[in-house]
Amino acid sequence: MNRLAGRRVEVLLSEEQIKQRVAELGRQVTEDYQGRDLILIGVLKGAATFMVDLARAVDLPLAMDFMAVASYGASTESSGVVRITKDLDASLQGKDVLVVEDIIDTGLTLKYMLEIIGAHDPSSVRICALFDKVKERKADVVVDYTGFTIPDKFVVGYGLDYAEAFRNLPYLGVLLPD
Ligand code: IMP
Ligand code: MG
């Protein structure tokens, strides 16, 4: 149990557990993308932490790009109606895209991202998500590489925030009520 900014955080996955799993995912991606034109695409800001760690665990030449999206509305659950605030820098034509996500919750954000990416005419598109919440999805998305399946609780750390705080925790934790 840790206390951060006055809030209690219960550790769900330790820094070491995450590190080991990211290394495994990196080895899998390295095997699967031999001789391909790999580009990692991350969704800011949550996926940035995982993406830079994953990239260093992949022993292949690769490119990286980021997109940023903002949800319309003030709900804590994504509505699936999103607006692009930072688009991709370059065309994806002929590229083998690996979409890197921090966490899949409803799946709505990812579904929207896949529509945008698909319109760029890439050679292939796969999804790598570090955390996958066990719950009924609102959007049907197939995740190709999953780090951990986790309970349907609000989690913070390793890139994930609560009101922009806690992204820099090296582990994944559950924010406990005060
Ligand atoms: P989805 O569209 O519901 O799948 O939402 C996915 C996005 O919501 C993720 O990329 C995160 O940025 C955010 N998110 C979902 N669950 C959590 C959580 O438990 N903690 C922090 N952010 C979350
Ligand atoms: Mg995200």
Image (cartoon, rainbow, N blue to C red):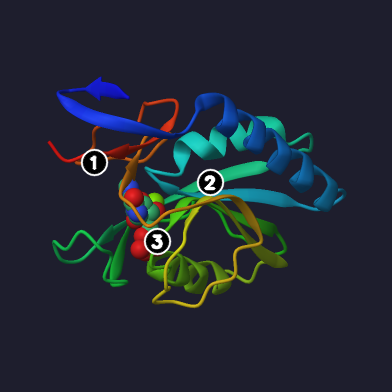
Secondary element type, mark 1: loop
Q: Which residue is mark 2?
A: 65
Residue at position x 72%, y 38% from top?
24
Q: Which residue is mark 1?
A: 162
Q: Position of residue 162 (x, y in %)?
A: 24, 41
Quarter assignment of residue 96 = bottom right
Q: Is mark 1 within 8 Å of ligand 1?
A: yes
Query: What's the amino acid at mark 1?
Result: Tyr
Q: Is mark 3 within 8 Å of ligand 1?
A: yes
Q: Is residue 86 visible?
A: no
Secondary element type, mark 3: loop
Q: Is residue 84 left or right of residue 12?
A: left
Q: Which residue is mark 3?
A: 105
Task: Calculate the distance from the C-alpha at mark 2 to the C-alpha at mark 1.
Answer: 24 Å
* 32 over 144 or under it: above or below: above
Q: Quadrant of ligand 1?
A: bottom left
The tag earlier along the polypeptide, 2 or 3, is 2
Q: Position of residue 21 (x, y in %)?
A: 64, 37
In the depicted view, which residue is nearer to us: 119 or 55? 55
Q: Is residue 32 left or right of residue 22?
A: right
Query: What's the amino acid at mark 3?
Result: Asp
